[in-house]
Amino acid sequence: MKIIQVTPQIGKNDLARKMKQAQCFLEKREQVRITLVVKGRQKGHISSSLQFLNEIHEEFFAECGKLVKSPTAENLSLMYNPSSRNK
């Protein structure tokens, strides 16, 4: 399993680079977990963190991976298995 950590303040280009790397892992038949790291006052804004993870899913992974685990307030991460189309 490959783990990729992002923060809510990540820049667009940095996020695109990390998500492209995650898509490459999925193409290589690896399981991928994307974890959102929040610190301090960011922990008080869980709804915006969940929205950020949902945007990541819709923008980068709607077609290339199978979502195994959705984010929750306690666990701010997405987990993907390679889809059968990526063989």
Image (cartoon, helix red, strand yellow):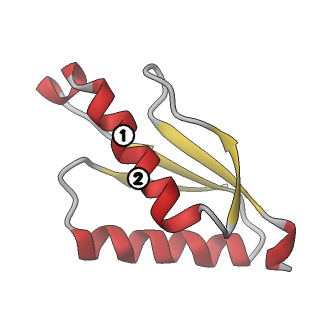
Q: In which quarter of the image is the C terminus?
A: bottom right
The disc at residue 77 is none
53 relative to 30, above or below: above
Residue type pointed to by label 1: Gln
Q: Where is residue 66 in the image (x, y as percent from the top left)?
A: 73, 55
Q: Do the residues labelled 1 and 2 touch (CB within 8 Å)?
A: yes
Q: Is residue 62 left or right of residue 85?
A: left
Q: Which residue is drawn at 52% across and 33% down?
A: 71
Question: Under tag 2, what secondary structure?
Answer: helix
4 relative to 75, above or below: below
What whole-number distance in Å separates the C-alpha atoms at marks 1 and 2?
A: 6 Å
Q: Position of residue 73 (x, y in %)?
A: 43, 21
Q: In which quarter of the image is the N terminus?
A: bottom right
Q: Which residue is drawn at 24% across and 70% down?
A: 12
Q: Residues within 10 Å of mark 2 (few under 14, many from 20)?
A: few
Question: Under tag 1, what secondary structure?
Answer: helix
Q: In this view, does 35 lie to the left or right of 27?
A: left
Q: Residue at x 23, y 23 (%)?
A: 43
Residue, disc 1: 51
Residue, disc 2: 55
Residue type pointed to by label 2: Glu
80 relative to 39, above or below: below
